[in-house]
Image (cartoon, coloured by chain):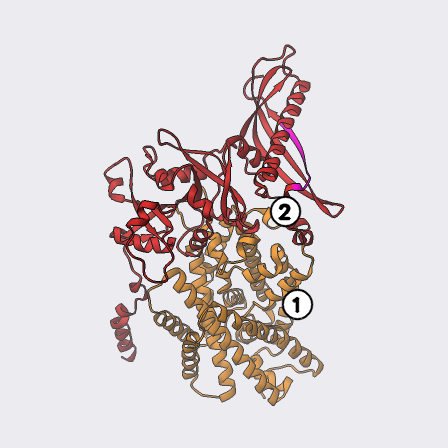
Amino acid sequence: MKKLLLSLLVLFFMPFWVAGCWDMIGLEKHAFVISLGIDTVEEDEKKEQPGSPPLSPPQRLHLTMEVFNPRLYKMNKDKHSIILHQSASSLDEALKLAQSQIAGRISLVHLRSLVIGEEYARQGIKEVIDTLQRSPKIASRFRIAFVQGSRAEDVMEAPAPTEGNTAEIFTKIGERDPAYGFHSTISFNDLLVQLKSCSGTAYCTRLHLSNNRWIQKIGAAVLKDWKLAGWLNPYEARSTNWITGRMDQTSVSVENEEMLVFYEATRATSRIITSLRGGRPHFLVTVKTDGILSGISEEPSSGITREYLEKIETAAAQKINAEIRWAVEKAQQEFRTDYLGFNQALKNSYPAVYNSLNWEETFPTVPVDVEVQAHITRLGTKE
Amino acid sequence: MKKTPGDVIYPACLVALILLSVMEIELYTGGSEIIKTAGRDAWLSVILAAPVSYFFLYITVRLAQRFSRCTILEYAPRLWGRPLTYAIITVFIGYELLWLVRTLWHSAEINMIFFLQKTPLLVVILFLIIGAVLLAGGGLVPLVRFFEFMFPFFFLSLFIALVLALSNMRISYLIPVLAHGIRPVLKGSLLYLSMLQGLEVVLFAIPFTQNPQKTLFPAMAGLSLIHILALLQISVVLGNLGYDGVLNLLYPSSDMLSTLQVPGWPVERFEPFLTLPWLLGVFTSMGLAVYLAGYGILQLVHLENPKPVYWTTGLLAIPAVYLIPNILWARSLSLPLRFLTLLVVYLLPLVSYGLAVTRKQKGDEHV
């Protein structure tokens, strides 16, 4: 009897005890943000702003949000999402203010991409990165990209007829889409690791809006001291990817005995070897590639012999070697910052030496040697 | 089917008991303290600490087998004398209470960050404590049965999460080995050893086993599982986030799972693989801490009805949680806890065993 009474009492109070009810929110009541765009606040917009409360920092961030709309998806519309805009002094404040524009509760659980406009990126991205990293709801696998010459909001409002929403385009750009070496793609987590280990220096995805408003992935963006420092064109991005190991697959055209030969590198491994010479760091970049002979402008009269393949391998290695030297020169002389990962190699091998140096000052003059081995492992389907 | 006597546990249950007793909030913190101390070589710290922990566990099991039907608090007067035994019991109660408060505070914190932000904190911790006290109130044998029942859910989900994370890890984040010398690695090993709160349960569980002389292998197996999971966890956290990426993180395991991309899997988020083992680990550890603290108090005051002691112990932890304002204060609580762990888990069994051997004490007579 005592147990029965106790059980009834527990059953009676159980509905009041369900701890989750305070936080319960139905799936249909969420507004899932799939992409965020960040820009500076435009002058016109600044004038329209109402008076700020005392001790408030000025509005400096314009947030564009792409919110997935299941209704549009059901109706088979070209675009399954809606775009919201909000200006505020910080990302967090903008997200809270934007809630007034939409009935569902804004949720970043399914955030797929972050796009940052050039003007904002040049002022510094540390604050935005910190806010996103602190949020427990965000999965840090989302993709991050910088827009050259346009605002992030322009890119997010660009048409997406094949994918349904622009976030999907960015995700495809970043995920399993073959890079062919001409651009660099990175997840938020990888960017964070790079930025933290290299004092705010990194290189990452660059987007460009073409004249017919198509989104293009091309080249790379270089960050220095948590700010956008400049851009790399597609060939510069490829030469950088050789060193950093972000090379997926690429095609190298070489000239051999007045014939044009196309070598497709299908696998590339790179390594930075550090040594000390007279107490100063010295680097050796080694790259090994396996690839296919993907085309010849004119076949040699003697046919394709082993000697002929060796000549092509040597020519391809020389070409890649020259590209890598070009990438090092670009980083050392133009950007004067180490987004190639030499600092990490030195820190790993000689931490005491690294700590004793001012790396930003030392990097532009450090000697770098390059060794490349290119191998042809297949000839395609033609002998 | 063979019947089991109600007050006896099988030696094999020690595997589940040790694993669920020791692993709790570390599942979320992902050995971040060890990584911050030992850097990229944190995984090596676990490997180096393992033989030391095996040695101490061997001594602990041998001590428990020597007094096969008494707990350490019962035979301590024969080894240490009454005044010192009272001191040991007081330290032991303080250690268990500190462990309980620390675990409860971190569970509340993780819950507020990741799961139930709007639910009043009191509701969450009250439920956890009520559950833990009810679990502890039944005594050690039902507690072990519960651990045994929960073991597959705990181990499998955690193992799946860690194996999935292996596919994304980069070995380059773990090398070079010993770039900063051996000292940080040894410090990391000591830190790892001081994090094995709950291992002292062996001293209390062996007297309840069916055959105390067959408990060494299951105890070692339980500890080995802890080492394997810790090694896997530290390696995948480092291999996915990198040393610099872990430095400022409070809960790297959750961050690590949020970076995962596994082609072909129909799910986007892998964090729930961590939620279930964490919840089980925290709950079982709290149940054990309430039981051991209450047991220590009962040894001091000799009450006939133990339940009020367990309820008081559990409910006292609730106001204590409110006294810790933030994570920085909670961290300062970890230092004395680690020191007490070294004292209770390693030093106490070692010296007790030394005294038992030199004084030729053994057997089950109570003093």
Question: Which amino acid is tagged 1?
Answer: Phe
Q: Residue at x 34, y 62 (%)?
A: A54
* Residue pointed to by mark 1: B55
**Label 1 to label 2, Cα distance in Å?**
51 Å
Residue extending furthest toward the right:
A278
Q: Residue at x 65, y 46 (%)?
A: A362
The reply to the same-chain question for discs 1 and 2 is no
**What shade does chain A have?**
red
Q: Nearer the viewer, residue A238 or B198?
A: A238
Quadrant of residue A118 within the rendered picture: top left
The answer to whether residue A269 of the structure is visible from this angle is no
Q: Nearer the viewer, residue B42 or A56?
A: A56
Q: Quadrant of the C terminus of chain A?
A: top right
Height in image: A143 above or below B354?
Answer: above
Q: At numbered mark 1, what does the secondary structure look like: helix, strand or loop?
A: helix
Height in image: B63 above or below A188?
Answer: below
Q: Is residue A142 left or right of residue B37?
A: left
User: Does residue A337 belong to the magenta stretch?
Assistant: no
The boundaries of the magenta stretch are: A365-375
Q: Is residue B222 left or right of residue A3?
A: right
> Label 2: few (<14), some or many (≥20) within 10 Å?
few
Image location (x, y in percent) of residue A22: 29, 64
- Chain for colour orange: B
Q: Of the numbered discs in the image, which one, if any, rests on residue A82?
A: none
Mark 2 belongs to which subunit? A
* Residue pointed to by mark 2: A361
Image location (x, y in percent) of residue A1: 27, 79
Height in image: A196 above or below B140?
Answer: above
Quadrant of residue A239 within the rendered picture: top right
Question: Which amino acid is tagged 2?
Answer: Glu
The answer to whether residue A368 of the structure is visible from this angle is yes
